[in-house]
Image (cartoon, grey):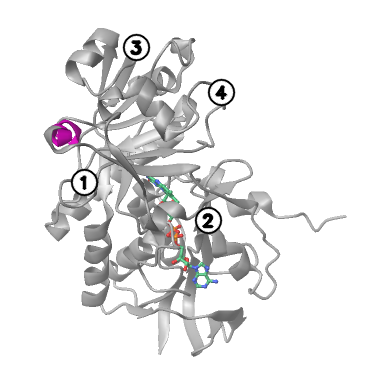
């Protein structure tokens, strides 16, 4: 059996690539070293933010485009996994005195420039609308929220099974080469032949590139992970304050904080992460942990019980030296494409990335302008 497309890496990017390719009629093989859903992969947490509020308008526009594909996917599957509660960026003068330079204010200007839906709150307006917070400024990215990951993974698996996509889990890839005009993948279970290859292997990408005959590409990827990721479980009488009908996704990115409301019966509490957002200038402030953020900006959670978030939120994501996605053809492997380097922010883009990778390998072009993400920007020149 030869395949039109082999995909190595069955996280959310590989799953969506397989979905788009199979819907176009391609015979698809999806390989992974682990099992789909393994919490060592970044894609299998309980929730992931979906928001447009990037400082760089290119990413903001792509996120909004991806959102339309999530809405399509949701309609097609009849499932409900996109929780549209908005994403609120806050700032407080006692923490970050230059309020007009905060992430909240800067990203708000980007969203306004792109004519995306926003709402602005003064300190008083914020306390009236979202009494969970103690801050001086709030900027709401309205068409945002979070994704409930478990039903998404299940829906993708069902679609791939129905489309007869061949999935080989727990499979070790030894070598990739061009043979008889095709791409040969030598695995521990035998040789697999495909016309085209997509690699969506996250932090495992360089290991696979090194196994491709004649491919010198190595990517400057670096693992990073949140310093802390916790569920804050409010007492019963307060739980209603923290569900998505009353609480949006929230962030204070200048100090490395983001959070998700609790999903009753599905997540234990309000998720709050403390991390180093790659696109934000680090500032020294009084907020140095989830607990200090709660004390300063979310006093309504002071009496909540805190537990660590387990699973994929304890694993690492893939930072890139120049802080841009890596998406495009693999130099040295005709018919091959790679997608990685999502910088801790990739989940929301997944259907768009999957569609783009499918277009690149099966249609040889894409409607997206992805020149900025070209893998070859990291190719070491062999000249001289
Ligand atoms: C803590 C945390 C919080 C995050 N929060 C958000 C968020 O709120 N919103 C958002 O949009 N994004 C978020 N992200 C980022 C998002 O989860 C990732 O960008 C996305 O899941 C990456 O998907 P992927 O398919 O590229 O990688 P992965 O899910 O890591 O999948 C890669 C797959 O490749 C396989 N593989 C690797 N090497 C090999 C090999 N040699 N052979 C075979 N298979 C191989 C692995 O086994 C794995 O299954 C977060 C990430 C983390 C870690």
Marking on residue 82: 1
Quadrant of the rendered image holding ligand 1: bottom left
Which residue in the protein does label 4 denote?
Answer: 283
Q: Please state which of residues 379 and 83 is positioned toward the viewer in this rendering.
A: 83
Which residue in the protein does label 3 denote?
Answer: 136
Q: Is residue 110 left or right of residue 238?
A: right
Residue 333 appears anywhere in the view: no
User: For mark 1, does the 10 Å Cα neighbourhood hold few (<14), some (14 to 19), or many (20 or more) residues?
Assistant: many
Compute the Cα span from label 2 to label 3: 43 Å
Residue 73 appears anywhere in the view: yes
**Picture mark count:** 4
Magenta segment boundaries in residue numbering: 238-245
Point 24% across, 48% down: residue: 268
Q: Earlier in the sequence, mark 1 or mark 3?
A: 1
Residue occupying the far right of the picture = 384
Compute the Cα span from label 1 to label 3: 29 Å
User: For mark 4, does the 10 Å Cα neighbourhood hold few (<14), some (14 to 19), or many (20 or more) residues?
Assistant: few
Residue 171, x across and y down, in percent = 47, 81
Residue 376, x across and y down, in percent = 64, 53
Compute the Cα span from label 4 to label 1: 32 Å
- State whether residue 189 is above or below residue 327: below
Q: Please state which of residues 63 and 104 is positioned toward the viewer in this rendering.
A: 104
Marking on residue 328: 2
Compute the Cα span from label 4 to label 2: 34 Å
The magenta stretch spans residue 17? no
Q: Earlier in the sequence, mark 4 or mark 3?
A: 3
The magenta stretch spans residue 242? yes
Q: Please state which of residues 221 and 129 is positioned toward the viewer in this rendering.
A: 129
Compute the Cα span from label 1 to label 2: 28 Å
- State whether residue 63 is above or below residue 367: above
Q: Earlier in the sequence, mark 4 or mark 2?
A: 4
């Amino acid at each position: 059996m030869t395949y039109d497309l082999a995909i190595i890496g069955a996280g959310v990017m590989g799953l969506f690539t397989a979905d788009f390719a199979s819907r176009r009629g391609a015979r698809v093989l999806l390989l992974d070293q682990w099992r789909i859903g393994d919490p060592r992969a970044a894609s299998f947490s309980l929730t992931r933010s979906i928001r447009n509020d990037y400082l760089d308008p290119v990413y903001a526009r792509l996120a909004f485009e991806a959102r339309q594909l999530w809405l399509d996917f949701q309609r097609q599957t009849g499932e409900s996994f996109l929780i549209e509660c908005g994403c609120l960026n806050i700032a407080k003068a006692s923490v970050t005195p230059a309020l007009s330079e905060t992430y909240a204010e800067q990203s708000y200007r980007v969203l306004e420039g792109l004519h995306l839906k926003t709402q602005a709150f003064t300190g008083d307006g914020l306390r009236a609308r979202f009494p969970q917070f103690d801050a001086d400024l709030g900027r709401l990215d309205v068409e945002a929220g979070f994704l409930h990951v478990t039903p998404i993974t299940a829906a993708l698996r069902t679609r791939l099974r129905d489309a007869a996509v061949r999935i080989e889990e727990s499979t070790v890839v030894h070598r990739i080469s061009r043979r008889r005009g095709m791409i040969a993948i030598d695995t521990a279970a035998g040789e697999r032949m495909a016309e085209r290859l997509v690699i969506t292997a996250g932090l495992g990408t360089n290991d696979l590139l090194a196994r491709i005959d004649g491919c010198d590409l190595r990517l400057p990827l670096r693992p990073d992970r949140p310093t802390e990721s916790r569920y804050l479980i409010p007492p019963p009488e307060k739980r209603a304050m923290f569900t998505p009908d009353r609480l949006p996704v929230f962030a204070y990115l200048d100090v490395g904080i983001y959070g998700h409301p609790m999903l009753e019966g599905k997540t234990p509490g309000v998720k709050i992460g403390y991390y180093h957002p790659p696109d934000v200038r680090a500032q020294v402030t009084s907020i140095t942990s989830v607990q200090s953020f709660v004390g300063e900006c979310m006093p309504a959670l002071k009496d909540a019980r805190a537990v660590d978030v387990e699973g994929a939120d304890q694993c690492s994501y893939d930072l890139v030296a120049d802080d841009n996605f890596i998406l495009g053809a693999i130099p040295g492997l005709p018919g091959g494409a790679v997608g990685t380097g999502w910088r801790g922010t990739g989940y929301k883009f997944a259907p768009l990335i999957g569609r783009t990778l499918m277009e690149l390998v099966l249609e040889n072009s894409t409607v997206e302008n992805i020149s900025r993400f070209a893998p070859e920007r990291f190719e070491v020149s062999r000249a001289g």
